[in-house]
Every structure is written in C-alpha cells, then in structure tokens.
Image (cartoon, rainbow, N blue to C red):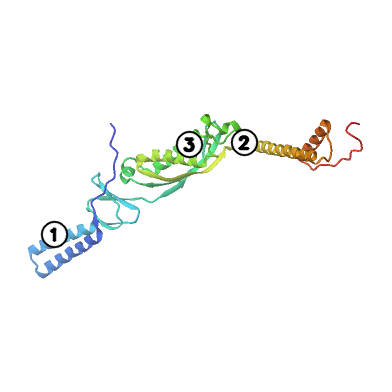
C-alpha cells in the first residue's frame, strides 16, 4: 500500500517573550497570595499558579534565522515553526530543529564509463538546502545520507548519458544537424542536466538543489596516456593544416605579384619549381638553407 507523502504546514506557536512575562507573573502572584494569606485555599491558588508558570516557561525555545522547529506529539506531526527568535509552543510537543541553510559538498571522484564506453573519472560540487521539513524528516530515514547516495547515483547516470569528448570532426554534429553535447565541451548544458537530475531525485526528501557543477573530469589512468597521444596527434595535424593553407596562399600571392609587375616570365616548369621551393621553405620545421644554382632548370 502506498503511503501518502508528508507535507509541511505551519505549527501553532507564539511569541516567547509574552509567555516569559506571563509565567513570571503567575509564579509571583502565587507566592504573594500564599504569603499574604496563608490558608488551604491560597495554597491551592499557589499550586495552580506555579503549574501555569512552569508550563509557560517550559514551552520556550529559540530559533535562529533559516532554522525551523518540527513538532510532534506522541509521534504525530503537528506542524513546523519557521519564525525566528524566542518562541513558545505546547510544552508536551517534541521540538526537533532542522537547518534550512544552504549546504554543499564535493562528491568523491567516481570511475564510470561515458556514453562511448570510455572509462573516465568524474566529480561534482553540489549545493542544496531543505525546503520541506516534513518530507525531509518523515519521507526518508536520513536525509543527509539520502542526498549523498542520490548524488552519486545521479552523477553516474550523467556520465553514461554523454561522451567525454568528440572523437572525430564528424562527431561534432549529431543527428539533425545539432552540435553534440559532451562532458568537456558542453559545460553549461551538462551542469543544467545535472541539476535537473538531482532535483528529480531530491524531491522526495523535500530538498532543493541550489547549484551543481562538475569539479573533476578526466580519462581514467589506464587510457589517459593513449588519449593524450591522440590529442597531441590531432593538434599536430590541425597545425600542419593551417601551415599548408597559409603557405598556399603566400605562394599564390607571390606568383600573382611577379606576373602583375612583369619582373620575370615563368613558364609552367619554372612555376612548378618555384611553387615546390616555396612550399618546402614555408612548411618546413627547420630554417631554409640557401643554395646557389649556377646552371639552369634545363641543364
């Protein structure tokens, strides 16, 4: 049988200073009455005043800002007082103070597989607070332990939903023409997905996610070296591609400039030789070594 979830509501309580004054007045009145006219009736009045004064003083409790007092009577929920300062409520109520302040923790570094099956390490910083004291106290056994466990589960599910990084250029665009979101490149999107996942899991405990972001993301040690070499190779290829594109543009400008100024007339063979030499000079990793040619291209 499904049990109905607890729901927070405001408890009946009063200003504590009022009950302090009332308690002192009752006790003082009883003392004055029994001392001024000692008689069995005055003793009874003193007893009633003393009991009333004790009840007024014993129901006092204090709440700080962003703190609530959850009240129960013989195991039955009787509401939550969220007003700060000196408060008073029925002395027979059990008052449990619950902090409503924001809390944060850094999750442990988890080793999981990403969407492509690559082992990665992932960790997150999560900020949360209690919003519903009744749910936090009655719908889960220990809401702090519940948060830690559900946060780990949500982080594992997040890692399985995204790839660590784009492996190839054609992977940067997913189906439908949209950019593929990865753990490394889609920082804001991944953080939003993590907050949504956590909120769905924390809702049962009456907890709100204030913020959540990844604080650690790396390949697992067993493949980190291989992935580093791959990234280095991609960087070298990209750099070479830029160099070649620039060199071709420079050669084109050089040939065009020579032709426009009429400094020299080059046939196809000489143009090919010039292009070859310029590309070697511009694309080489080493400084060019000058060579004096005493002959011609045709000897």
To which quarter of the image does residue 51 belong? bottom left
Task: Tell us which disc is closer to us: 1 or 3.
Answer: 3
Taking 129 as reference, is 251 above or below it? above
| Earlier-in-chain disc, 1 versus 2 | 1
x and y percent of residue 209 in the render? Answer: 41, 44
Report how far apart the C-alphas of labels 1 and 2 lie in the structure. Answer: 82 Å
Look at the numbered discs 1 and 2 and tell me whether their residues touch, using CB distance below 8 Å: no
Find disc 1 in the rendering and name its residue. 48
| Earlier-in-chain disc, 2 versus 3 | 3
Q: Is residue 192 left or right of residue 273?
A: left
x and y percent of residue 273 in the render? Answer: 82, 34
Helix, strand or loop at label 2? It is: helix
Q: Residues within 10 Å of mark 3 (few under 14, many from 20)?
A: many
Residue at x 84%, y 38% (from the top left corner): 264
Find disc 2 in the rendering and name its residue. 227
Residue 109 in sight here: no
x and y percent of residue 10 in the render? Answer: 26, 49
Residue at x 40%, y 50% (from the top left corner): 102
Helix, strand or loop at label 3? It is: helix
Q: Is residue 232 left or right of residue 150?
A: right
- For this orientation, the residue located farthest to the bottom is 36
Helix, strand or loop at label 1? It is: helix
Q: Nearer the viewer, residue 6 or 58?
A: 6
Q: Nearer the viewer, residue 180 or 4?
A: 180
Look at the numbered discs 2 and 3 and tell me whether their residues touch, using CB distance below 8 Å: no
Q: Residues within 10 Å of mark 1 (few under 14, many from 20)?
A: some
Taking 18 as reference, is 120 above or below it? above
| Earlier-in-chain disc, 1 versus 3 | 1
Find disc 3 in the rendering and name its residue. 158
x and y percent of residue 25 in the render? Answer: 18, 65
């Amino acid at each position: 049988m499904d049990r109905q979830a607890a729901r927070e509501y405001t408890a009946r309580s009063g200003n504590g200073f009022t009950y302090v004054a009332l308690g002192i007045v009752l006790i003082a009145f009883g003392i004055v009455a029994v001392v001024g006219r000692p008689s069995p009736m005055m003793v009874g009045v003193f007893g009633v005043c003393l009991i009333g004064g004790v009840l007024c003083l014993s129901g006092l409790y204090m709440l700080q800002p962003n703190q609530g007092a959850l009240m129960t009577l013989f195991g039955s929920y009787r509401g939550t007082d969220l007003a700060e300062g000196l408060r008073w409520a029925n002395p027979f109520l059990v008052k449990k103070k619950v902090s409503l302040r924001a809390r944060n923790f850094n999750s442990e570094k988890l080793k999981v597989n990403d969407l492509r099956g690559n082992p990665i390490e992932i960790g997150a910083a999560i900020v949360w607070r209690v919003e519903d004291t009744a749910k936090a106290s009655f719908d889960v056994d220990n809401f702090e332990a519940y948060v830690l466990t559900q946060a780990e589960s949500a982080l594992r599910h997040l890692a399985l939903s995204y790839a660590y990084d784009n492996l190839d250029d054609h992977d940067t665009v997913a189906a439908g023409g949209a950019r593929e979101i990865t753990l490394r490149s889609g920082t804001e999107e991944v953080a939003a997905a993590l907050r949504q996942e956590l909120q769905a899991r924390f809702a049962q405990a009456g907890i709100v996610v204030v913020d959540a972001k990844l604080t650690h993301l790396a390949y697992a040690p067993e493949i980190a070296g291989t992935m580093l070499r791959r990234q280095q190779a991609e960087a070298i290829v990209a750099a070479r591609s830029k160099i070649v594109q620039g060199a071709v543009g420079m050669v084109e400008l050089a040939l065009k400039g020579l032709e426009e100024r009429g400094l020299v007339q080059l046939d196809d063979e000489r143009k090919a030789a010039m292009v070859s030499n310029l590309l070697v000079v511009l694309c080489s990793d080493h400084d060019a070594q000058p060579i004096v040619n005493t002959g011609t291209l045709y000897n």
